Structure formats: C-alpha cells, structure tokens
Amino acid sequence: MPHTKRSFLQTLTACSLAATLLASGGALQAKENAFKSVPLGVEAYIYGYPLVTMEMTRRVMTNVEKPEGTRAPMGQIVRMREYPSAAFRDVTAPNADTLYTTAWIDVGAEPYVLSLPDAGGRYYLFPMLDGWTDVFQVPGKRTTGTGPQTYAITGPHWKGTLPEGVKEYKSPTNLVWLLGRIYCTGTPEDYAAVHAMQDEISLVPLSSYGKPYTPPAGKVDPSIDMKTAVREQVNALSVEEYFTLLAKLMKDNPPNAADKPMVEKLAKLGIVAGQPFDGSKLGPVAKEAFSTVPKIAQEKIMLHMKEGIIDGDFKLEHGWGFTTKTGLYGTNYIQRALITAIGLGANRPQDAVYPTSEGPNILESYNGAKKYVMHFPKGQLPPAKGFWSLTMYDKDYFFVQNPINRQSISARQDLKPNADGSVDLYIQNESPGADKESNWLPAPNDKFILMLRLYWPSETDPSIIDGSWKIPAVTAVE
C-alpha cells in the first residue's frame, strides 16, 4: 500500500540521520535520542490531533462579526436554515438529514446557560464536546426527552451556585462545542417548523441569564485562512507550530487523569502545558529527524481505518467498516484521531453509528464510472429509532455536487419498493431512469465514499450494535 511505503521511507530517512551521527563519532545518547524521538513524536502528534483540530476548526467557524451561514462568533448560536451544500468545507463528513444548531463557547471565565424549548416529540440531540472531542453530555429525545430544559455548562474549575431550575453540566475543558442536530425532512413546511424551534433556543453567559442580553460583535482575524479545509490546515502545520499550539491549548484544556503517562512522554519531547515547545531537548540530529513526524503520523491516522479492523476498533461487513467506539475514547488515541480526521463531532454509539465504505471490498474503491446497487430484503431497512440515511461523499469526505442536489437518501425520499417488498438503492453517476429516480443516490464520476447513518440505533434484535442486523453489500452491476 502506498501510504505504508511512504511512511517506511520517511522513517528510514530519519534513521539514516542517526546512523550518520554514529559514524562520525557522535555520542550513543544522541543516537538513541534520534531513534526514539520520531516514534515518540508520532505518538504525541496522534494524541494531540483532536485538540489541535478542534482549535483550528473553532477559529474558522467563529471568525465573523455576526452569525451568518455556518459560522458565528464565540458564544453565539449558528442556526443553519438548510442542509449544508456541496461547497461546505468547515467539517468533514457533514450530514444532510438534520439542521445543525451549534455554538462554540469558552467556559473558562464563566458558565454559559443553554435553554432548549419544547420539541413536541421531534427527534433531536444536543451533544456537548470538550476540547478533546469527547461527548461529555448529550441532552435530547433519547436521554432527556423533548420537553423544555435548561443547562449551565461550567468549566473544569468553576464553583458556584446556579439559579433554580438550571442543571449543571460540567465540561472537562474550557473549550466546548455544542453540536445540536434537529431532524428535518427538508420540505418547506418542516423547514419552517424546525426554524421556529431553533429560534427559541438560547445561549447566554450565566451573568446575563434572566436578563436582556445582546451578544457582542465578533472580531474578524484577517490572518485566519477561511478557504482551505481545516484538515488541510492542520496537516500543513510544521512540527514546531503543531506542538507549540498543542502545549498552549493544554493549559486551558487539561488532559484527563488517565492521560498521565502520555503527558510524561510529551514532557520528554519538550511539550509542556502552557509553555512554548522546546525542541532543544531533542539535539540537532534528532530535531532534523523530528521534522518527519507530521507526515508519518497523518498517514498512520488514516491507515487506522483498515488496521483498526485487526485491532478490534472497527468491524468489517460486506465492505462496510464501522465502530461503536465513538464519542468517548478513553486512552484509545489513534481511534480518537481517526474519528477527528474523518468525522469530527461524532456522537456516542447509543446516539449514532456511522458505517463507512470506500469500496465493495477492502482492496477496491468505488468509482462513478461503474453503477452500483444496495439491496435491502423486505423488512430489513436500517433499524433506527431516530432515523437512517445513506450519504454520498467524494474521496475527501465532502459532499458531491449533483443535478438533483441530493446528498443523502433515506425513507423520506418515499423509496419505491420492488414487487417482493425489498428495496434497491441505485448508486451511480447518471440517473437510473424516471421510474427509479426516487431511489437514486447520485455519485461523482470518479472515486467516492459512502456513509450509512443510524441515529438512535435499535438496541434489540435487529441491531447493528449487537450484530443481529447486517449491513447489505453494495454491488457493481453491468
């Protein structure tokens, strides 16, 4: 595989540098420093990838004066009025089934109060992510019902008294991403109903709760790249830039207690919370070898999609890879980094499972030059209490522009069954014909990726969680 080959060559280069030093009479300690720094640096890079990515995402999504489109200043709500378009590049693997209602907040100075209105039985969830991408709370229909509710999101060091009727949700970090999703069918009537619900959601600092509040205008930083995809910006950071930012962020977003061994490893590399990255601890040769760390780490993260099947982090069924290890990661740093890279903002498995397929098997990629069918036997559509959908992405996990503006397909398309009650989904570049277009998911003319979403997946037979429901294969047809 090409990724593995490149990683090998980069590691070999780093090792050659150390060998050169040894041949010139350098100290054994310096030689060991060079050999150890690269794999340790890769480990540290993978550990910090979620926190750095969250910060870079926050910068882009809050770099505006007032809420507009998919962005809003810190502490203010984005109320997306329609599904993201094919031009959306802020977050990888967005969905086209819910209207996002999101906000970025800093609870370091004081808590923020989130008020959710009566949803009238509508499916929604409002996961709260800390700076390391763990979902520390998730109010919504599955967990707290759809009645009115109010929460104070407090920082890790906050102590105080809350108003009556306000429940505390303590965040492990100062940085918090509220990533609300409200199900919507996409019709004009349902858009209007969800818009009304969105307008009733409020977010204010605790000091302003119960009082008239006008959020301050945001400050635009012209130095922030607002065009390049966030993942590309993160991957382009030099090793010095990356670890300097990580150390800075760790001050206000402390690692978990279970991360202590990793924090000690970071310190050996000169990465200490609140302090600039000190590369001098590496020595000149090790420092040069260390420059290979980002590229090697990035490839290792992406390879985990396949390697995780061996490790047990992922399952593989008929070309579909999926995991029930999302939203809460513990010390599984490589899993956390991969989910950050391909699906930032992923929910806990009880709320959503995201089977993903890059091809009909592990060796073959999907390509729009071919036509594919996904066949569901009668009564075996994806079992979900919230909703299910099949979403189309390009090779980089972004939406695909197409003539009918359909990014996902689900029961809301009024799928046409076959005579025996089974359902076929047609996945191809060109229309399968007017009589089959209700079941058509448009594909690009080159490589693409499919993601099947099951929100609030059934926990009893049939269930994807316990394996009693199997995902059908996507097969090429002539």
Image (cartoon, grey):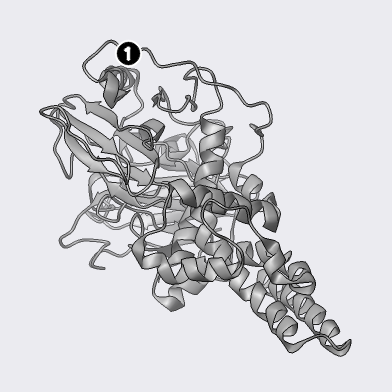
Q: Which quarter of the rendered picture does the C terminus lie within?
A: bottom right
x and y percentages locating residue 79 in the rendered image? 39, 23
x and y percentages locating residue 296 in the rendered image? 66, 67
Farthest left residue in view: 164
x and y percentages locating residue 255 in the rendered image? 41, 58
Farthest top residue in view: 212
Q: Is residue 475 above or below residue 440?
A: below
Instruction: Locate residue 404 relative to residue 180 in the image: left or right.
Output: right
Judging depth in this view, the residue of 182 and 370 nearest the camera is 182
x and y percentages locating residue 206 in the rendered image? 27, 26
Amino acid carrying label 1: it is Tyr
Judging depth in this view, the residue of 160 and 100 nearest the camera is 160
- Residue bearing the label numbered 1: 213
Judging depth in this view, the residue of 381 and 209 nearest the camera is 209
Q: Secondary structure at mark 1?
A: loop
Residue at 38% x, 40% y: name it. Answer: 176
